[in-house]
Amino acid sequence: MENSKFINDNFINYVSKVSPRTNEVRTLFRAFWVGGLICCLGQSFRMLFENVFSLSDDVLAAYVSMVMIFLGGLLTAFGVYDRIGKYAGAGSIVPITGFANSVVSPAIEFKTEGYIYGLASKMFVIAGPIIVFGISSSVLVGLIYYFIYNVL
């Protein structure tokens, strides 16, 4: 038992020596301004669609979401979103474009395995659990809402 603690301590010391040091303030600042910039871009599209095309409510939200998802997927396909992610860290994965990136990245990576076994099956490796949980929880909440307001 004493030997395993010694090995664990040695391993932790080794990892701390070879791991790169991070500047937390710089990392937080980058995440904040890049995530904020992505959100400002989405807000700009919202204002454009609202004022130029006179869209409102759900239609407006749907169009803005589609544009942001498209841009996230397009930037991922060209390799730009990966560079943004390396620079900004979590600031690039929080907005809706990060979700698009998590769907497109595995699809591009596994495209060489074919369209069915590669692209189609690996597309939702990262985002799949999120989609399943979101759908399942929304159905559950919808059923609870239905029974509370219509049955009781």
Image (tube, grey):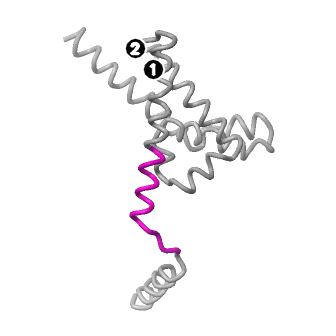
Front position in the image: 66 or 140: 66
Say whether residue 91 is left or right of residue 85: left
At 40% from the left edge and 65% from the top edge, which residue is drawn? 24
Image height of 24 relative to 21, above or below:
above
The residue positioned 65% from the left and 40% from the top of the image is 75
Q: Are marks 1 and 2 in contact (CB under 8 Å)?
A: yes
Q: Amino acid at mark 2?
A: Asp
Where is residue 20 shown, x and y percent of the image?
52, 74
Mark 1 residue type: Ala
Residue 13 is inside the magenta segment = no
For disc 1, the marked residue is: 61
| Residue 22 lies in the magenta-colored region | yes
Q: Secondary structure at mark 1?
A: helix
- Say which element carries label 2: helix
Q: Residue at x 55, y 30 (%)?
A: 68
Task: Determine the residue positioned at 29% across, 14% down.
Answer: 146
Query: Mark 2 sits on what residue?
Result: 57
Residues in magenta, as a range: 20-35
Q: Is residue 19 above or below residue 152?
A: below
Nearer to me, 35 or 106: 35
Kindly identify which numbered label has been placed on residue 131: none
Quadrant where the N terminus lies? bottom left
Residue 62 is situated, as x and y percent measured from the top left of the image, at 49, 19
